[in-house]
Amino acid sequence: MIVIRLDRVLADRKMRLNDLAALVGISNVNLSYLKTGKVRAIRFTTLNAICKALKCQPGDILEYTEEESEEGSEE
């Protein structure tokens, strides 16, 4: 599962969501959906603009974690 860590990067940069939305050129609502993980996809152009505005790498914003299976983990 991919987890969005945009809130952490924003806090590190002491930047508000509204400021980032203005820099990137997308609505506060769409950026908020991204921040809370309510999106299923992100365009590379949007990711590029976010990384440029925050001076970060995509890996600073996106994190992969193992999903637990519904039946529990198999070992």
Image: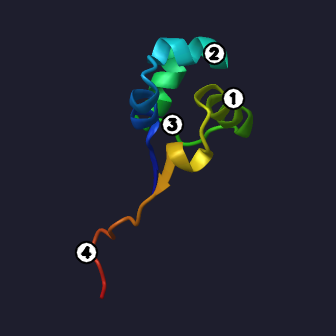
Horizontally, is 51 left or right of 38 in the view?
right
Q: Which residue is mark 1?
A: 49
| Circle nearer the viewer, 3 or 2 | 2
Task: Find out whether the residues at labels 1 and 2 contact each other: C-beta distance under 8 Å.
Answer: yes
State the residue in front, 55 or 19: 55
Q: Amino acid at mark 1?
A: Ala
Q: Which residue is mark 2?
A: 23
Q: Which residue is mark 4?
A: 72
Q: Amino acid at mark 3?
A: Val
Marks 3 and 4, Cα distance to the nearest angstrom?
A: 26 Å
Q: Which residue is mark 3?
A: 39
User: Residue visible at 59% across and 39% down?
Assistant: 56
| Circle nearer the viewer, 3 or 1 | 1
Sequence-wise, which precedes: disc 2 or disc 4? 2
Q: Secondary structure at mark 2?
A: helix
Write down the quadrant of residue 46 in the picture.
top right
